[in-house]
Image (cartoon, rainbow, N blue to C red):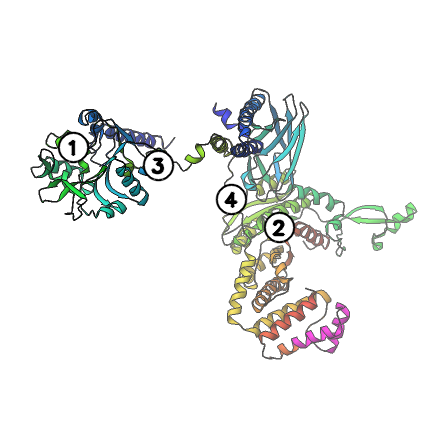
Amino acid sequence: MKQFFRSYYLTPRVYGGLGVLIAIFILAYVVPWLFYPAEILTYLFLVAIVGDSLVLFLNKKGITAERICAEKFSNGDENLVKLVLESRFNFPVQATVYDELPEQFQIRDHQFHTALKPLEPIELSYNLRPVKRGSYQFGIINVLVVSPAGLVRRRFQLGTERAIAVYPSFVQMRKYELLAISNQLKEFGVKKIRRIGNNMEFEQIKNYVSGDDYRKVNWKATARKGHLMVNQYQEEKSQQVYSVIDKGRVMQQPFEGLSLLDYSVNSSLAISNIALKKGDKAGIVTFQDKVNSMLPASNRNMQLNLILEHLYKQKTAYKESDFSRLYITLKRKVNQRALVLLYTNFESLSSMRRQLPSMRKIAQQHLLVCIFFENTEVDGLINTSANDIEDVYTKGIAEQLVFEKKQIVKELKSHGIHTILTPPKELSVNTINKYLELKSRGLI
Amino acid sequence: MKNGKYIIALVALVVIYIVYELNKPKPTDWSVTFSHHSSTPFGSKALHELAPNMFLGNTLNSSNRTVFELYKEDGIEDNMLIVASGIGLGKEDTEIILDQVAEGKTVLLSAFAYGGMLADTFGLVSETQDVIRLMPPKEIEAALLGESSVSINLKMGTNQTFQYPELGATSSFEPIESDSLEILAENEAGNPVLLRYRNNGQLIFSSLPLAFTNYFTLLSETTGFTEAQLSLFPEGEPIVHNEYYQLGRMESGSPLRAVLAIPALRWATFVLLLGLLAFLIFQAKRKQRIIPVVRPLANLTLEFVQTLGRLYYRQSDHQNLAAKRILYWKEFVRSHYNLPTQHLNEAFTNELVKKSGKEKAQVEVLVKHIQLIQAGEHVSEDLLLNFEKKLNEFYGIS
């Protein structure tokens, strides 16, 4: 009985009908002969509601629904969810589907209207873009069914509750992986890097194709084969690439819902994957007030999975970061010269200068790339014209912020520290670009 | 169920309280109602039950309508008894009563206090100590059982004297001057308590309404006085006990009574209520689970910049701000056009015009502005605003 009440709803049509009846009764006050027809109509209407209820609620089989989605979602990307519905009623029905989304999305008006024919399964699909890593709890699927009479709605509670895990963006990782291998990154804004340095480890002799350096032409081989042959040298391999993620206060700032920390996590995953594919060793270090975790660089088969899991479970209290502790850890644990990609953020010159000594120390031993973010929020402010003197001041301050970031780049450069100043959205592309550049320049 | 035992304890407490309240001896209700339904001391059920004996065959009916409604709308032809704490009749009621009396009816009014048109007509002034309403029940009981009493002397028929408990006879009229009123009874102080006006019929004023209550009707010392008053009605004619002036209409006070009286509108109302009820039961339900509110992280950069801007604005160091903006502009020129910005001379301007594709005049004015500011010219608010305009033109911001 309780179940019946919980699944019983009336449609707006019923309330509309009652409204019309009320209007007729009021009219009957003026036109008395309308009274009895109105009375009869009222009874008929009640009978219709009862009839419609019976039609909907006597059917035992009703509706089936199932949610189909991946077990892992990719953070910051659109993830596909499908709903498959099938009606076992022997007449066409209208259905309103409320899929209970995980609370992290904060979506409360998620619904579909669809017509269901008997025994014809239909598929509904939608995309979800999570912006936080972690466990997400899907609820059940509520389907409200209306018969063609359209007076009563029956709610079916279908499907099962299910938890899915939102992982660092593996979608982005795969996307850049193929492109980096096939040198197509320029389509995504990754420019082709001119090879400056050359490694001397010989790999093979191959046919000349246009674009190859003709200083490398192997004349002896050419003479033997009758067409141009060039020597090819091996890229340096098995170099260590550490993604060092600052989990401090400054990384909490969100852009388009995703915090800088999550941007960094996504990017670390993508760059680690590429590094592994290129034969380098990838590792992860995270720190805030102290070094929280370290995954030593390696190029074993399972390293990518380890990195993914390692990044997935990163949590933070957003404390003030201590770069000196990072330096000590790197000094102790990373003995070989490595490429250190340090994801952090500086809003002002002074905040950078505070960390500069530690960074210089790290840069002495390793190739340090300091990655920090353009504040795209103030761009809007800078690109509008100011109306009054107070706006001019605000704009001036905004310009100063942007200017200071560029100052930071220069100052780091003067200390031999490479930098990437990037909008959060283009972080992965710019980081991969830098990695390829440093690699081809043979700086590690 | 962590709270289970608390709920049980609460329910137990409520049950105990209800049982206690139910078993508590009910205190006597001393409120003055004059209601014919009421068997409390100051109701008048006894009067109605004893009426056939007391009135020598008169019937006593009860009504909750005004005098006007009874005589004009319903057209009754009965005599009338009106008992109330206070009677203040308006013009219509007064005229109708006087008309009815002129036609030979008997109307008996009994109240602690009189007011309104009728009292004015006869120059009646009540000397009232309507204390009963203000007294706590215990004191009323004590006063009634107490020794002190007031004697009421009848000035008609047998000239009997009745001993009233003091509380029962607190009101009287002030001595009257009018000749048209006849004194039928006085209290010990010589003030009239029962007056009569004759004009074919009779209009009787009593200042002792409590005489008609259960308590005094049944009290052996005072029942005679009640009887004496009622004997003033003509024998055998029906009497209407009008309770309207004490209790009001005693019908449904619902503001919808006019609507409910008409079948069509009654149906409309019920259908409306049915709809509302259905809405409450079936529509105010959730369709999906509750999603707790989780505040997303906010990017506070804009607020931060605005606050900082306001702070600088309070200082109003226009020179400083202009210098900041020049720095940004120079950086812009260096990074976009690859021009050194050390010397802002003629050659620089020409080169900038070529590289930026802006009009020469426009660039010249801008560079002039910058030179002025850098030269230590006093930067006024107007200059700063003007500078902003020039910069916007240069950056291509509309």
Q: For mark 1, what is the residue?
A: B226
Q: Is residue B307 above or below residue A329?
A: below
Frontmost of labels 3 and 1 is 3
In contact (CB < 8 Å): disc 2 and disc 1: no
Q: Amino acid at mark 3?
A: Lys
Frontmost of labels 2 and 1 is 1
* Residue B82, horizontal then vertical, whole percent: 25, 36
At a point 24% along the width and 28% down the height, the residue shown is: B237
Give the distance between the C-alpha atoms of the residues marked 4 and 2, in whole angstroms. 45 Å
Q: Which element is circle 4 on?
A: loop
Frontmost of labels 4 and 2 is 4
Label 3 or label 4, whichever comes before in sequence order: 3
Q: Which residues are magenta?
A: B344-370
Q: How many marks do you count on the picture?
A: 4
* Residue A219, horizontal then vertical, whole percent: 88, 51
User: Looking at the picture, do discs 3 and 4 lie on one chain?
Assistant: yes
Give the distance between the C-alpha atoms of the residues marked 2 and 3, in whole angstroms. 117 Å
Give the distance between the C-alpha atoms of the residues marked 3 and 4, in whole angstroms. 72 Å
Q: For mark 3, what is the residue?
A: B72
Q: Callout 3: residue from which chain?
A: B
**Left or right of residue A72: residue B263:** left
Q: For mark 2, what is the residue?
A: A336
Q: Which element is circle 1 on?
A: helix
In contact (CB < 8 Å): disc 3 and disc 1: no
In contact (CB < 8 Å): disc 4 and disc 2: no
Please say whether residue A131 is visible from this viewpoint. Answer: yes
Q: Amino acid at mark 1?
A: Thr
In contact (CB < 8 Å): disc 4 and disc 1: no
* Residue A101, horizontal then vertical, whole percent: 57, 37
Label 3 or label 1, whichever comes before in sequence order: 3
* Residue A110 is covered by the magenta coloring: no
